[in-house]
Image (cartoon, rainbow, N blue to C red):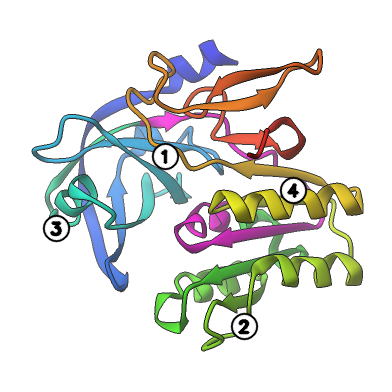
Amino acid sequence: MDCMRESQKRQGLYPIVKKTACARQTYDVTVLCPDIAKTASPGQFVHIRCPGVTLRRPISICQVDAQRGTVRLVFEVRGRGTAELAQLGEGELMDLLGPLGHGFEILPGARAVAVGGGIGVPPMLEALRSYGENGTAILGFRSANAVILEEDFLQNGNQVRLATDDGTRGTKGFVTQLLKEQLEQQRPDIIYACGPTPMLKGVAALAQQYGVCCQVSLEERMGCGVGACLVCACKTLRENGYEGYSHVCKDGPVFEAQQVVFE
């Protein structure tokens, strides 16, 4: 598997064909990169070189159109690197390395629930694309003005349930409340999740309680993006039951929830 991904990985300068601001300090960018688009799968990411910054920045793949050869990226400005990235406009070139990492397992004909929190929402869109009405997106945001991609999930044919911290959209509270309700109403075959660690820990606990397979995408700072450094090490359980460390960039970012040691 690693050898196959290595041969499919590409690096190059690719043109931005569309860019919009979808929320405060959050940008929606479509890049024309046919060689990356043809092999990318849900849950993978690209490593982007930001102008004037040494280390690349990992951005989850939001959507792939292999026919058009495009990859869609949605990211929030969180520091100097993403701030520089946000300055790039349509027609300019973006330096991408990818697709990288292990993605989500897609189960044809099954029912899936995807739980996304904040900037963990974008990779959920591609994960649910093939499920149509059998896919439910449970999305959490700080407030109504931070909500992104709701219409895109609806265009997938997915059901959408929203939670906000302040109650200005959807249910006031956490996505775990909505997930618990969903599990009691109709148990899915698989749960996907991406977002803050406390959210992932809660989702994993509910999945275990209800006996549902769960895969989580971890968010970690990265150095190389290909497993050569130790910047993105995370604690996981080995097959022998002992704890060890895995690379989020190479062994993940998607892991079986029961494999991750949440601290």
The residue that mark 2 highlights is 172
The residue that mark 3 highlights is 89
Mark sitting earlier along the chain (2/1): 1
Q: Are marks 2 and 1 in contact (CB under 8 Å)?
A: no
Q: Nearer the viewer, mark 2 or mark 3?
A: 2
**Residue 112 falls in which quadrant of the image?**
bottom right
The residue that mark 4 highlights is 204
Distance between mark 2 and mark 3 Cα atoms: 36 Å
Q: Residues within 10 Å of mark 1 (few under 14, many from 20)?
A: many
Tell me, yes or no, if residue 58 can be seen here.
Answer: yes
Q: Give the extent of the magenta segment.
A: 98-127
Q: Nearer the viewer, mark 3 or mark 4?
A: 4
Q: Which mark is residue 37?
A: 1
Amino acid type for the residue under numbered disc 2? Lys
* 211 part of magenta stretch: no
- Residue found 33% across the figure and 26% down from its top: 223
Distance between mark 3 and mark 4 Cα atoms: 39 Å
Mark sitting earlier along the chain (1/4): 1
Q: Nearer the viewer, residue 88 or 109?
A: 88
Up-down relation of residue 162 to residue 262 (above or below): below
**Residue 117 falls in which quadrant of the image?**
bottom right
* 119 part of magenta stretch: yes
Q: Residues within 10 Å of mark 4 (few under 14, many from 20)?
A: many
Mark sitting earlier along the chain (4/2): 2
Q: Is residue 210 left or right of residue 4?
A: right
Up-down relation of residue 189 to residue 148 (above or below): above
Mark sitting earlier along the chain (1/3): 1
Q: Nearer the viewer, mark 1 or mark 3?
A: 3
Q: Are marks 4 and 2 in contact (CB under 8 Å)?
A: no
Q: Which mark is residue 177?
A: none
